[in-house]
Amino acid sequence: MQAPVVSFEGFQSADRQKILDTVSNVDRAMSDCGFMASSDLGFSDELIARVFEASATFFLSDTKNKMRSAYLSAEENFGYQAFASEHLDPASPADLKETFTMRNILNATIEENRWPSIEFKELMQFFFAECLERAFLLQRILAEALNLDEDFFVKFHSGQNISLRLLHYPVCSSDKVQDSQLGAGAHTDYGLTTFLFQDSVGGLEICDQNGNWQDIEPDKSVVLINSGDLLERWTNGKYRSTLHRVKPMTHGRDRFSIAFFVDPDSDTEVKVLDGFIGADSPRKFSDVKAGDYIRGRLENSHNNLYK
């Protein structure tokens, strides 16, 4: 299966019809699938290749080096988490992956010795800024699609809870994989939207509206974009926060991916928008504060840190 392909080029044109076409295509993809793919967000292929190379170099280094950057808390949401230390599906065995998460790294104060290197830090900060610029573009498209002020979503995203995450799924022997154990357990993302960059190794699956798991073909030429829980809550379920997972790498090559999680600032009150409540569409979600919701989801997946 391929996610719906959406071009963003028209939104930045002076042609009103092209703008409306982009808005309509995004609205349809987020409503029907909760995932879409784009090849024209303006990311440099060379920059993405450098980030993947830095990711592989870090993950393939020795454990002592990686543990210098160890993840300490969901509140900080920064650092390295070792293989099989996270449960994205808390009801299933630990995920067969290792990760490096970097929250709010344009503003957060992280001690220099917790970064793999100064070069690594500078590269990730530059890439973070590039992703953030595109995230704001998407937020303005979503606002237009939902008949909101242009900066409705932008004003809630200073970067406080926005995170860049590197992921590594090593090949592992099938006889060491427990029943129901996955590379990444079935989950929805927590915030507004996510950008996902994949290598050429497959494994991602999404759950369609009929409850069936569909393979997503890996394509290095596109960025996958999906909606998260808080966008679903804002729109009363109009935009799906789609369940997805990654299969264990029991053959072939290691899988690497990069995720950019666009989550609202902690004090943001997420309330179902009035325009999505009516006689035929009663309120499905209670009001939540973004920071409490995101932190709760993180702590639930990292429960080994709190025992």
Image (cartoon, rainbow, N blue to C red):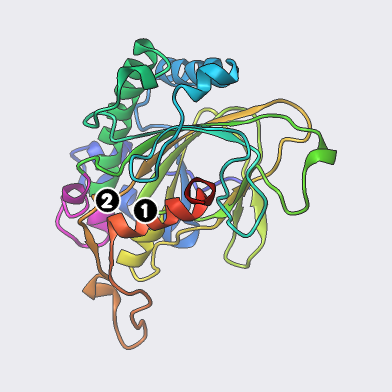
Relative to 160, say whether 307 is above or below.
below
Q: Position of residue 228 (x, y in %)?
A: 41, 55
Tell me if residue 269 comes above or below residue 222 in the rendering. Answer: below
> Tag 1 or tag 2, which sits nearer the N-term?
2
Q: Is residue 119 visible?
A: yes
Question: Which numbered tag is attached to residue 295?
Answer: 1
The residue at the point 47 percent across, 47 percent down is 36
The spot of residue 141 in percent (x, y) is: 27, 49
Neighbor class of circle 1 (other Cα within 10 Å; few <14, some 14-19, many 20+) is some
The residue range painted magenta reads: 141-157
**Label disc, if present, on residue 271 of the rendered structure:** none
- Whether residue 166 is in magenta: the answer is no
Q: Tell which of 144 and 13 is nearer to you.
A: 144
Indicate whether 101 appears above or below 298.
above
Quarter holding residue 147: bottom left
Rendering coords of residue 234 (x, y %)? 30, 65
Residue farthest toward the right in the current orientation of the protein:
175
Q: How many residues crowd around disc 2 within 10 Å: few (fewer than 14), some, or many (20 or more)? A: many
Residue at the (36%, 22%) spot, across then down:
124
Mark 2 element type: loop
Q: In the picture provided, is 293 more to the left or to the right than 67?
A: left
Q: Which residue is depicted at the point 62% across and 28% down?
A: 200
Extreme residue toward the bottom, this view = 279
- Compared to residue 301, the image places residue 61 above or below, namely above
| Picture quadrant of residue 41 | top left
Task: Name the element at disc 1.
Answer: helix
Q: Residue 141 or 261: which is nearer the viewer?
A: 261
Q: Residue 294's spot in the image, x, y percent? A: 36, 54
Q: Is residue 56 visible?
A: no
Distance between mark 2 and mark 1 Cα atoms = 12 Å
Residue hosting label 2: 264
